[in-house]
Image (cartoon, rainbow, N blue to C red):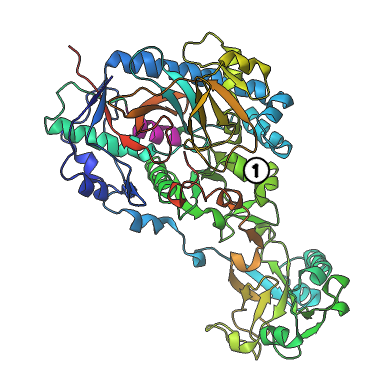
Amino acid sequence: MRRVAIGERSDWRATASANGFTFHTLEGDPYWDESHAYAFTLAEIEQDIEAPSAELHALCLDFVGRAVEDERILASLTIPESAWDVVRSSWRRRDPSLYGRLDFSYGGEGPAKLLEYNADTPTALYETGVFQWIWFEEMLAAGRLARGCDQFNAVHEQLVARLRDMPGDGTLALTSYADAPEDRGTVAYLEDCARQAGLATRFLDLADIGLDGDGRFVDRMRAPISRLFKLYPWEWAFADAFGRALATAPTRFIEPPWKAILSNKGLLPYLFAMAPNHPNLLPAYFEGDPGKAALGTAFVKKPLLSREGANILIVQDGAVLAHDHGPYGGEGHIRQALAPLPSFGGRRPLVGSWIVGDTPAGLCIRESAGPITTNAALFVPHYIEAEG
Amino acid sequence: MSSQAEKAPNPAPRGSKRSETVTLVLLAGAGAAAWGFARIDPSQREEDVLVYNGPEACISAAIRTSEDCRRDYATVRLAYPNAAPRYATASDCESHHGPGHCVTGDSVGASATGRFVPVLAGYIIGRTEEQDLDPQPIYDHRPSEAGPGYVGSGSGGYCTSWGGRVSTTSGGSSSFARVASSAVRPASFGGFGATGRGFSSHGGSAHGSGG
């Protein structure tokens, strides 16, 4: 794994514009950065990222099967009791999942270490599946990448295929905050994929989801919503005024409610307990577990529910190394052994490994200056070097 | 419309680890401005309803069974005291429903005490049983606010408890109306999103709720 100063395409902004990539710059700050790229060997991708991703995802599914039948686990994840049946029945029905992203600390040496599973509301999807792919094809066509190079990125094809294969009535409504550009962009992309999968789609702002007298979720025209993709975390939906209606509404959701079990940092201590010798798992404990002492004076403290690095505390040699402030943490914390992100000339990449359906489908890298990957991270493309 | 991406000169070779082709059908060449494309015009979802001032008119029209007419009217009578819109003053009520069409709340039910409510003008029932439409009480609407297509006899048509407008097609004894579903099917909105807004002070709204 190398960080290569590969240089920008001179016209990438026009290309972004032509392909609907509107959020490459967010609130004046750059987000997409192709001045350099990360290069991997095929073995690094297949043995160190792809295979462990498939294994860990399977382990996660095993855990969901256990968790839904054990109220102590659901309670420890702070899933509200009113939502247990919703979560449980979505798993018992095997409501299908569309996608998720495993985040790893990996720098080319030693096993990738799972930091968390963003299983419910991952973004960076369009950038991965489309714009990173276009970057690669254009760099290859321009001779700036050697013939025989490749990219781990079947995300787009897999999404369309998964959407096509999911059972349903041929419709899909999609929702997010309409005024959050990154979310809206991600949902617009998924709507594009769903159209290509032959589904009749419509976008609804979160505020445009209604609840009718029969307990069904409807749109403003009172048309029932049979299937809804929501880029809105389950723990928020459970806490909202309509949360109680989820138990009886016939709507099926993507991601399904059982994903609330995986998008929770409390997953990490359970995975570690299930497979303590797994090379890709870091020791992790609930904050209330005396076992946490085993981590000594170097660990990361994470809220059970947080996104984009918010409220994460890194302790090294007993001193606070980094601390992101934010609104999360009231629900409790876990402690995870410290696996510092590798440094490439002071830049720290976080490897995101996409799961579409149940299959590893591609990779994205978000790069930070500091040890915590926050929403200020830059999206940096990657490629696989030609063999030999 | 397809994306520039689709025009990549050589599709990825089979056996590679990337998509062979990447096509966009909605986003390509469009950008954010086109994201409203899938919003459906509310006028597109309509349905046919029957409007009667009471069960006798419904029964004599013989479109729905007399059993349905009576049952739905009983449902509406029961719902009316709690469903009728409330106004602080008689003039507020009359400005919406017309002079002489309002009564004091305590005359219809304890829950409306101290307020003013419109009198029950009749009810709406679905044209067919298969519509599965809950019957709704309706109230007279002040004529000056009648829709442009309205040709009723001196009335302003009707409205439902939440203000949905209903005008019969030719006034008089005609009971038929084609209305927006939203006018006759109640729903509450805004029940999702509030929890996340409480977190929006961190990280900026551009980042929303994804991660």
Q: Position of residue A56 (x, y in %)?
A: 49, 18
Q: Position of residue B99 (x, y in %)?
A: 72, 91
| A157 in magenta | yes
Q: Chain of mark 1?
A: A
Hey, which residue is sitting farthest left in the picture? A143
Front in this rendered view, residue A274 or B2:
A274
- Residue name at image x 69 percent, y 74 percent: B51
| A21 in magenta | no
Q: Position of residue B112 (x, y in %)?
A: 82, 74
Circle 1 sits on which residue? A238
- Residue name at image x 43 percent, y 37 percent: A374
Q: Position of residue B61 (x, y in %)?
A: 72, 75
Q: Is residue A269 above or below residue A279?
A: below
- Magenta range is A153-164
Drawn side of residue A335 relative to residue A364, left or right: right
- Of helix, strand and loop, which mostly describes the magenta segment? helix
Q: Is residue A192 above or below residue B151?
A: above
